[in-house]
Amino acid sequence: MNPLAVQLNQSIQTSNEHVYDMLSQLGKEIYFPKEGILSQSAEAGKLAKKYNATIGIATEAGGPMHLNVIHEKLSAFNPKDLYPYAPPAGKPELRTAWREKMLKENPSLHNKSFGNPIVTNALTHGLSVVADLFADEGDAVIYPDKNWENYELTFGIRRHARLVNFPLFTEQMTFNSQGLRDALLAQKDAGKAIVILNFPNNPTGYTPGAREGEEIVAAVREAAEAGINVVAVTDDAYFGLFFEESLQESLFGKLASIHPRVLAVKVDGATKEEYVWGFRVGFITYASDSSEVLSALEQKTLGIIRATISSGPHPSQTFVLEALKSPEFEQQKAEKFAVMKGRANTVKRLLDSGKYDDAWDYYPFNSGYFMCLKLKTVQAEALRTHLLQQYGVGTIALGEQDLRVAFSCIEEASLEDLYNLIYQGVQDLLEA
């Protein structure tokens, strides 16, 4: 094993042996090179005042070389903030700004010890980093039965982890904290579990209430007290889109430092929070009482980034940073939030009107981009196909009964027509 990896492992093991035990074999072996091209280039950047012949970009007239056909569309930005490579950890100013944003929006993080967010190529890349660092073949990855299907690819296919699902809802249609607790405690012999908490939930658009949030934290703490090392991952892709009484912040803050056997990891990003899906700017953040653990995990994360994408795109990081710094940012974001909340409220009003009750129930939703219908009389895939072919309406079939509808991409004035067409599709299938 490389001496740098050994050094990082020793640092983690000395500070918290449980976090060391959470690492996958790859997680133990990975490191960020301190010597070589990157380190020599960094040294030259500070000291090579006459000629710096280390960097792997082309320069011209004291700045990065670029084509005018590209820059004329981006002329509001300095070429140095667009064209050179971004650091593997991301633009330092962006990392600082995102950390400040996290503290502002998550009061439970105050007085907690957590690292500086590391820039990822959006949420999927952040989850992939988690999988690489912590998931070995056969390790349990726990998440609800209503979930984003990419978890299976990221943890199951890529890392051969063992996927453990539990029902998202109880019969009373509240979050199934007992199901989470049981799934966690079932890993006592293995001694390790990775749990993914995705709120607002994709596909249902559900965020637990404050009491349910406390139950979730209690379940994770109980597992830790039973001797299980828990990597508690909050997938906060749709963070901030809370439309009703529910948790208004990430569980990351509540999970941080609750037990030495719990490592809280936050994966989030500008992707959906700031409506910049194609920019691919995400973040991964670790919580630990040990600065040595935080530093070592950052180095290992940079090793994964260096070995896969090298670094994230620079222009989109600059765009997001400039938005966060803008005095108009909060107002414009509030305006978009109001649009999204209006659509969610309209959907709920339509569904509660009673006109569709013979065709479906719906799962609780109070946040995010989506909601899910629970069909009573027809199969979800048959309805999805019929709607697409007969009415030009696209929906997502999940299992036999569930149909996901994204109200995020439908104008509020068109929502009633959308649900009327879905209802008509059900009637068509029953009459066929």
Image: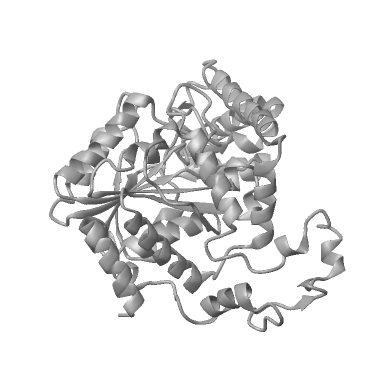
Q: Is residue 188 above or below residue 9?
A: above
26 left or right of 117 in image = left
On the picture, is 18 further left or further right than 235? left
Task: Give coordinates of residue 37: x percent, y percent.
Answer: 54, 81
- Foreground residue among 403 and 25: 25
Give the image location of residue 19, x and y in percent: 26, 57
Q: Is residue 385 visible?
A: no
Residue lying at the far top of the rendered structure: 353
Q: Is residue 258 above or below residue 344?
A: below
State the residue at coordinates (38%, 26%).
209
Pick the front one: 150 or 73: 73
Q: How is the image coloured?
A: one colour
Identify which residue is drawn at 68% across, 54% down. Answer: 318
Q: How many marks?
A: 0
Q: Position of residue 361 (x, y in %)?
A: 45, 26
Residue 10: x and y in percent read 26, 68
Q: Give the residue displayed 49% in from the left and 59% down from the top.
A: 125
Residue at x 47% of width, y 22% of height: 358
Q: Is residue 290 left or right of residue 369?
A: left
Q: In screen coordinates, is 157 left or right of 355?
A: left
Q: Can residue 271 be seen by looking at this rendering?
A: yes
Vertical position of residue 311 compared to residue 142: above or below: below
Name which quarter of the figure residue 391 lies in: top right
Which quadrant does the C terminus fall into?
Answer: top right
* Towards the viewer: 214 or 431: 214
- Classify the position of the N terminus by image quarter: bottom left
